[in-house]
């Protein structure tokens, strides 16, 4: 598919998108408090199950509470999953999940396509995503992947935003940005730390600086290396053309951090050097493709086709 570089008249749309990115900074700050992340993740989520027979109930329960869960934890979570008609079932639950085929227009579990139930539940209950991932393993991978993608996009867009004084109106209109972030490096690193807290929470691990000292320290040290690389590349490219490399590096570095943490919390070992290189290269290309769609073009190039996107 051919992608055309946005023309000059696309600047208002870009401006709105960039401003929205800046407005998300304050929301991101609240997530730097690990106790808030912990509170969101440990908020109990209750399920009400509706099925025609005991076999169907068991299938749904095994979907939510697989045998690979530690026995103690599985028994604890079982108290949050209730069959319709159980005497101890609460009057209200957070999510009602039906056996597939019983009714139309409801959340349903199909054993042939369990991923559909996961997608629909997360779409309808996105406010419970972190808690669902921590408490029920089937939600963990999609929630963590969405976290990584979301924070990587934020960092990529933010890196471009801070280099576009002609797109963002006089930054005096956004005085809080200078009060809370002396540079984009501070924001990008803070956002990665927020992501680290959230990934640990979603992965069922302990959350906070005391429990994640090694991970947080590596983020802070690594930030200066990524920043230097972005500056070096941007400085060697003609004015305006260095925006995409700068944003793509922020995107790729954040994505690598997120995938590395996901792997560490799952396998209890860090990425190998080869895994790090491959993940970064793939993320860098993905970041370039994404940022080409939102960064402004020089007028002379506005009508020229860009490279084919994958």
Image (cartoon, grey):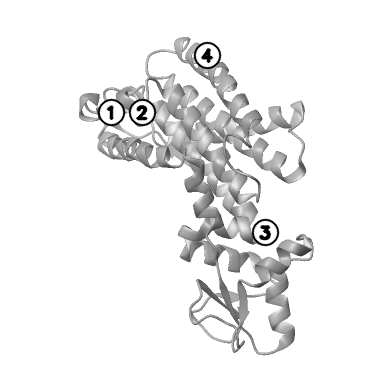
Are dots 2 and 1 in contact, CB under 8 Å?
yes
For label 4, the residue is 228
Image quarter of the C terminus: top right
Give the number of the mark in front: 2 or 1.
2
Q: Residues within 10 Å of mark 1 (few under 14, many from 20)?
A: many
The tag earlier along the polypeptide, 4 or 1, is 1
Which residue is at the front of the view, 15 or 195? 195
Left or right side of 264 for 233: left
Q: Distance between the residues labelled 3 and 4?
A: 38 Å
Where is residue 116, by image quadrant? bottom right
The tag earlier along the polypeptide, 1 or 3, is 3
Which residue is at the front of the view, 229 or 219? 219
For label 2, the residue is 161
287 lies above or below 86: above
For label 1, the residue is 167
The tag earlier along the polypeptide, 2 or 1, is 2
Q: How far apart are marks 4 and 1 (CA)?
A: 24 Å
Are dots 3 and 4 in contact, CB under 8 Å?
no
Q: How far apart are marks 3 and 2 (CA)?
A: 36 Å
Q: How far apart are marks 2 and 1 (CA)?
A: 8 Å
Left or right side of 201 for 54: right
Residue 231 image position (x, y, % from top left) = 48, 14
Q: Which mark is residue 137?
A: 3
The tag earlier along the polypeptide, 3 or 4, is 3
Q: Residue at x 58, y 35 (%)?
A: 255
Q: How crowded is mark 2: few (under 14 residues within 10 Å), some or many (20 or more)?
A: many
Q: Residue 302 carries which label?
A: none
The tag earlier along the polypeptide, 3 or 2, is 3
Label 2 SS: helix
The tag earlier along the polypeptide, 4 or 2, is 2
Q: Does the image show residue 280?
A: no
């Amino acid at each position: 598919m051919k992608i055309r570089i946005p023309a000059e008249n696309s600047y208002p749309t870009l401006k709105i998108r960039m401003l929205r990115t800046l407005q998300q900074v304050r929301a991101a700050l609240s997530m730097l408090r690990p106790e808030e992340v912990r509170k969101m993740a440990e908020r109990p989520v209750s399920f009400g199950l509706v099925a025609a027979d005991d076999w169907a109930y068991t299938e749904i329960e095994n979907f939510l509470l697989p045998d690979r869960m530690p026995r103690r934890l599985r028994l604890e979570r079982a108290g949050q999953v209730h069959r319709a008609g159980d005497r101890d079932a609460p009057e209200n639950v957070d999510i009602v999940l039906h056996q597939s085929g019983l009714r139309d227009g409801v959340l349903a579990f199909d054993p042939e396509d369990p991923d559909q139930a996961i997608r629909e539940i997360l779409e309808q209950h996105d406010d419970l995503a972190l808690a669902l991932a921590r408490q029920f393993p089937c939600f963990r991978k999609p929630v963590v992947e969405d976290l990584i993608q979301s924070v990587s996009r934020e960092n990529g867009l933010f890196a471009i935003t801070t280099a576009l004084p002609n797109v963002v109106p006089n930054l005096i209109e956004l005085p809080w940005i200078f009060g809370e972030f002396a540079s984009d490096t501070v924001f990008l690193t803070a956002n990665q730390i927020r992501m680290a807290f959230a990934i640990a929470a979603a992965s069922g691990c302990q959350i906070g600086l005391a429990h994640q000292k090694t991970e947080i320290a590596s983020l802070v040290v690594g930030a200066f290396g990524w920043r230097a690389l972005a500056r070096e590349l941007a400085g060697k490219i003609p004015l305006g053309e260095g925006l995409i490399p700068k944003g793509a590096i922020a995107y790729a570095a954040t994505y690598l951090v997120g995938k590395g943490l996901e792997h560490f919390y799952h396998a209890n070992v860090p990425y190998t050097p080869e895994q790090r290189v491959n993940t970064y290269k793939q993320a860098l290309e993905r970041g370039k493709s994404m940022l080409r769609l939102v960064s402004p073009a020089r007028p002379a190039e506005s009508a020229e086709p860009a490279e084919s996107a994958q």
